[in-house]
């Protein structure tokens, strides 16, 4: 998730991107963060394991989005 947060930070600070360019990437990152996070102070190992396929799918989708937009 640290790498995903770095990607979001880079997207937030990209002055060359046209308005709305990163919208679909933000949606994917939001889903990744939703699936990967447990409520504060809780050990949600079972929930994380259940969400693992969803995390993988969203991570794959983000990788595809990045590959489709290599210059940005």
Image (cartoon, grey):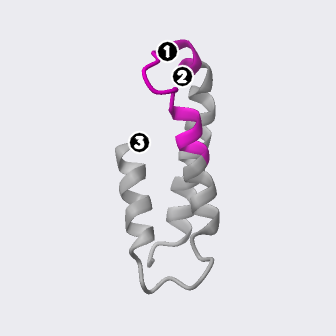
Judged from the image, the secondary structure of the residue bearing numbered disc 3 is loop
Neighbour class for label 1 at 10 Å: few (<14), some, many (≥20)? few
- On residue 45, the disc is 1
Reply above or below: 34 against 14. above
Tell me the quadrant of the picture where the C terminus can be found.
Answer: bottom left
Q: CA distance from mark 3 to mark 1?
A: 16 Å
Q: Which residue is mark 3?
A: 1
The picture places residue 28, in percent across and down from the top left corner, at 60, 52
Judged from the image, the secondary structure of the residue bearing numbered disc 1 is helix
- Seen from the viewer's position, the closer of residues 62 and 1 is 1
Question: Do labels 2 and 3 touch, CB within 8 Å?
Answer: no
The picture places residue 35, in percent across and down from the top left corner, at 58, 34
Residue 11 shown in magenta: no
Outermost residue toward the front?
41
Residue 35 shown in magenta: yes
Q: Is residue 26 left or right of residue 9?
A: right
Q: Is residue 19 left or right of residue 3?
A: right
The picture places residue 51, in percent across and down from the top left corner, at 61, 26
- On residue 48, the disc is 2
Which residue is at 63% across, 34% downward?
54
Which residue is at 62% across, 20% downward?
50
The picture places residue 19, in percent across and down from the top left corner, at 59, 83
- Counting residues from the start of the chain, the first of labels 3 and 1 encountered is 3
Neighbour class for label 3 at 10 Å: few (<14), some, many (≥20)? few
Question: Do labels 3 and 1 touch, CB within 8 Å?
Answer: no
Judged from the image, the secondary structure of the residue bearing numbered disc 2 is helix
Neighbour class for label 2 at 10 Å: few (<14), some, many (≥20)? some
- The magenta region covers 31-49
Question: Do labels 1 and 2 touch, CB within 8 Å?
Answer: yes
- Counting residues from the start of the chain, the first of labels 2 and 3 encountered is 3
Which residue is at 51% across, 26% downward?
38
Q: Is residue 12 left or right of residue 53?
A: left
């Amino acid at each position: 998730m640290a790498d995903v947060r770095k990607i979001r930070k880079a997207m937030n600070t990209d002055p060359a991107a046209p308005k709305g360019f990163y919208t679909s990437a933000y949606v994917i990152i939001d889903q990744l963060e939703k699936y990967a996070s447990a409520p504060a102070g809780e050990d949600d190992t079972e929930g994380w394991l259940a969400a693992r396929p969803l995390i993988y799918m969203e991570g794959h989708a983000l990788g595809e989005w990045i590959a489709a937009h290599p210059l940005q």
